[in-house]
Amino acid sequence: MKLAYWMYAGPAHIGTLRIASSFKNVHAIMHAPLGDDYFNVMRSMLERKRDFTPVTASVVDRHVLARGSQEKVINNINRKDKEEQPDLIILTPTCTSSILQEDLQNFVNRASFETKADVLLADVNHYRVNEMQAADRTLEQIVQFYINKAKKNGQLDTRKTDEPSVNIIGSFNLAFHNQHDIAELKRLLSELKIKVNLIIPEGTSVYNLKDLPKAWFNLVPYREIGVLTAEYLKKTFDMPFVDITPMGIVETARCIRKMQYILNQQNISVNFENYIDIQTRFISQSAWFSRSIDCQNLTGKRAVVFGDSTHAVAITKILTKEMGIHVIWAGTYCKYDKSWVEKELLGLCDEIIITDDHNLIGDLIAKVEPAVIFGTQMERHVGKRLNIPCGVISAPVHIQNFPLSYRPFLGYEGANQIADLIYNSFTLGMEDHLLEIFGGHDTKEAIGGSLSTEFDLKWTIEAQTELSKIPGFVRGKIQRNTEKFAQQKNIQLIDLETIYAAKEALNS
């Protein structure tokens, strides 16, 4: 456990709440201090949904600390069962409840005798897993519970649908451009004449989970959440699954070919090559754009990429394979997924970074001074401080990542959106220079770009004036080089002589 003012992935109970609140008519209860109920505000604000967040906090207060929870958790479960009439109530422990060493499973067992709803205790270790690992495990736990329940009641029908069908596993709350991604996947599958059997968990009733085995295969678009469920269905019902993220022209084609292979293995003669060819050459604009003179100007430009496993790997592949951009380093904060990320990124970048330390990432960006950053909201803030443009490509999410307009990242339309994001992220680096030439907002003030706090560097008025004469698109780099030189020489007041000395040292 550590105290931090920024985390790429939240604590485990947030992952459980994301899955529980994604299902239809499921209520979650967390046993935690009052401050831990920020999830309700986060979901209501970011998802822009009109319903109330189905999460209740069973508050750990001074009385609980003194005497234990006693009947408090059980009473909250029973109260919500009567008020909300959910199909499932899932109780999630937190670090606080773990410290108190309370037997939450006993609370669940006792409450189950009186509730009409099913009651489950989230099976996650809150000291060992983070938000995404907990979400992945919670989804698997719920699916497994209702399939076993249907099997016990003789309601499990494993006969396949008459026509090829698929389950999409990975539509959930507070995910990056998720709603648009799922809409694009549904469109793509419709054009391939593959019916969608179920989309889980978003908007699905837990009573429909018994129909999962009817699909011909499963599609898991995101590495972070859904793989455990797909592996369970594979083990239990021998259901094949596709875990290739269809992001970018190349990977979308590879995903479609994997679906084609699975259907061919089940004696369905399909050939999607013509569809891939038409989409790539005539429908999607990104393949044509990547060969245009505009995009060729980006060839050899230097970039860094950082995010969750899915998006960091996919964006790196697009940059290197489709747009000819040099990725200095790429990485992820999903440390538990290190081996997969390293395997996928092998040969695509100079260095692979696996860390959840945002300060280290900031220092690495400042050190290599890329032309552009592709990362999370944290890297966007780093880019602002260093005057380096940044395209946001991954969670943690922000209100900006829930656009009202249609902006998927998956499929062929997603490839168009990503191509726009990449190109505009680079070209915006010229914006200040153009504004200086043609007029616009005041861009003369030099903004500090160093992330180092070891030296309290100050600039004289004459040095600031000289720096403001430099075109905006290179000013940040010159400022950083000058400050780096000043730190090396232990100079705390930068004047004109320091600027010229730094230039001489750089050219020597």
Image (cartoon, rainbow, N blue to C red):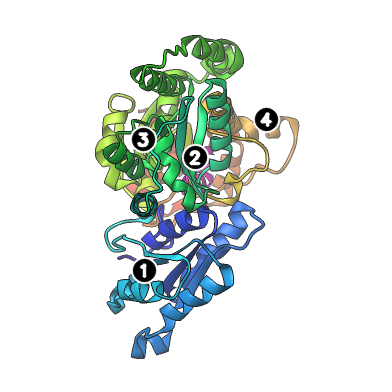
Query: Could you tell me which residue is drawn at 48 percent across and 20 percent down?
Result: 249
SS for tag 2? Answer: strand
SS for tag 3? Answer: strand
Query: Could you tell me which residue is drawn at 28 percent across and 47 percent down?
Result: 336
The residue type indicated by label 3 comes to Ala
Structural distance between the alpha carbons of marks 1 and 4: 54 Å
In the rendered structure, which disc, 3 or 1, sits on the residue that comes first in sequence? Answer: 1
Left or right: 387 as drawn, with respect to 258:
right
Region rendered in magenta: 378-395
Q: Nearer the viewer, residue 330 or 413?
A: 413
Give residue 93's quadrant in the image: bottom left
**Residue named by callout 3:** 330
Magenta-drawn stretch contains 483: no
**Residue named by callout 1:** 93
**Which circle marks residue 434 in the picture?**
4
The residue type indicated by label 1 comes to Pro
Q: Position of residue 472 (x, y in %)?
A: 59, 35
Q: Quadrant of the N terminus?
A: bottom left
Between disc 4 and disc 2, the foreground one is 2
SS for tag 4? Answer: helix
